[in-house]
Image: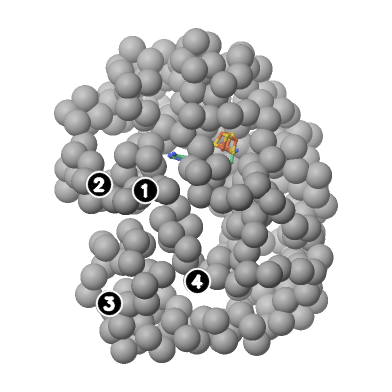
Amino acid sequence: MPNKIQFCCSAAEGPGIQLTGISGQIDKNAIWDKKRKYISLLKKGIIPKECNKCYEYKENQKGSFFKNLFQADEKTSYIVVNHFLDCNCNCIYCSQKILYPNQSYELLPIIKHFYKNDLIDLNSLRVEFQGGDVSVLNEFEALLNEFKKHNPKTISIHTNGIKYLSAYETIKNNGNNHICISLDAGTRETFKQIKGTDSFYEVLENIQKLREHSDINIILKYIIIENVNDNLYELSQFLDVVSDIENISITLNIDYRSILSIGKSRKRFDVPPHYYEMFQYAKSYCEENNISYYVNSLEERILEKGYSN
Ligand SMILES: C[S@@+](CC[C@H](N)C(=O)[O-])C[C@H]1O[C@@H](n2cnc3c(N)ncnc32)[C@H](O)[C@@H]1O
Ligand code: SF4
């Protein structure tokens, strides 16, 4: 996060378990002390107030899930690079800009410190770049090289795709690594309305260029945004334009602002019938055109229940 290190996935929801006051060095004990406090509470079945908004907790109220979740002395196996908000576009849905202040710190010295002090599980590390957009992050290439040097299990990159980086081509396809681009539209006009920038065709060109220069998994995302792109016409245009690109995966998401409590109190969201039609349409289209398609577990759960609260 731009102003802290956070230890759990409630990132899109609330404060999570966190370490603030970041500088270049992090004391191993400071991390474990922080975690131990939460582990001992969760193991006793006491839910710390920071966990209240966590959707994992809401879905797994039995508590056993949490008992297994935090192991104090394990090494770090999952790093989300999310300490910056600099970006070259302005999405109407951007949850990051709602949640975090626009400040940053240098991450590379911290990552080097983690590797040097044996704080990282070298066999299972997953690295996920979020942001902001890595394409405008000065230390991105240095960070990527540092991680690549240690051969992590997974590198995933989220980008808007507006700016092409040849650094993407240096990431090998190991079966796990991927680059996810949220296109969210099938037409130039809707793209501009969502992203605040007129770059629809540039993004398509960049996806095509990446496909030609790399065999990495490319995931193209369509976030369904109420009253903006939540219609079959836009979705079908999206599928038609991307289906020409070889070997891609498609996923549909629902705008977090509808299903999670981002910067506001939680309100029940009933999945409208036309959302189901969109998911079904995308699934059938991908099946017919031999395109890989998947739905995240969060969306899967919400679609199954019919609502998110
Ligand atoms: C905050 S973005 C940063 C990375 C990059 N700039 C991008 O847009 O892909 C990280 C991921 O969160 C997703 N995201 C941001 N706001 C969202 C929202 N309101 N609903 C669903 N996904 C969202 C983006 O699509 C992206 O895949
Ligand atoms: S491209 Fe990503 S970081 Fe930038 S505004 Fe959009 S969602 Fe936010």
In-front residue for pair 91/180: 91
The answer to whether residue 148 is seen in the rendering is: no
Q: Residue at x 47, y 66 (%)?
A: 16
Asked if ligand 1 lies within 8 A of label 1, the reply is no
- The reply to whether the C-beta atoms of the residues labelled 1 and 4 are less than 8 Å apart is no
Q: Which residue is mark 4?
A: 17
Label 3 element class: loop
Label 1 element class: loop
Type of amino acid under label 1: Lys
Question: Mark 3 or mark 4, which has the lower sequence index?
Answer: 4
Crowdedness near tag 2: few (<14), some (14–19) or many (≥20) residues, C-alpha within 10 Å: few
Residue 240 image offset from top left, x and y in percent: 43, 14
Real-space CA distance between mark 2 and mark 4, rounded to the nearest whole angstrom: 24 Å
Real-space CA distance between mark 3 and mark 4, rounded to the nearest whole angstrom: 17 Å
Asked if ligand 1 lies within 8 A of label 2, the reply is no
Type of amino acid under label 2: Lys
The answer to whether residue 286 is seen in the rendering is: yes
Residue 109 image offset from top left, x and y in percent: 81, 65
Q: Which residue is mark 2?
A: 267
Real-space CA distance between mark 3 and mark 1, rounded to the nearest whole angstrom: 26 Å
Quadrant of residue 178 within the rendered picture? top right
Real-space CA distance between mark 2 and mark 1, rounded to the nearest whole angstrom: 9 Å
Real-space CA distance between mark 2 and mark 3, rounded to the nearest whole angstrom: 24 Å
- Nearer mark to the viewer, of 2 and 4: 2
Q: Which residue is mark 1?
A: 264
In the rendered structure, the answer to whether residue 31 lies left or right of residue 16 reads: right
Q: Which residue is mark 3?
A: 63
- Nearer mark to the viewer, of 2 and 3: 2
In the rendered structure, the answer to whether residue 203 lies left or right of residue 279 reads: right
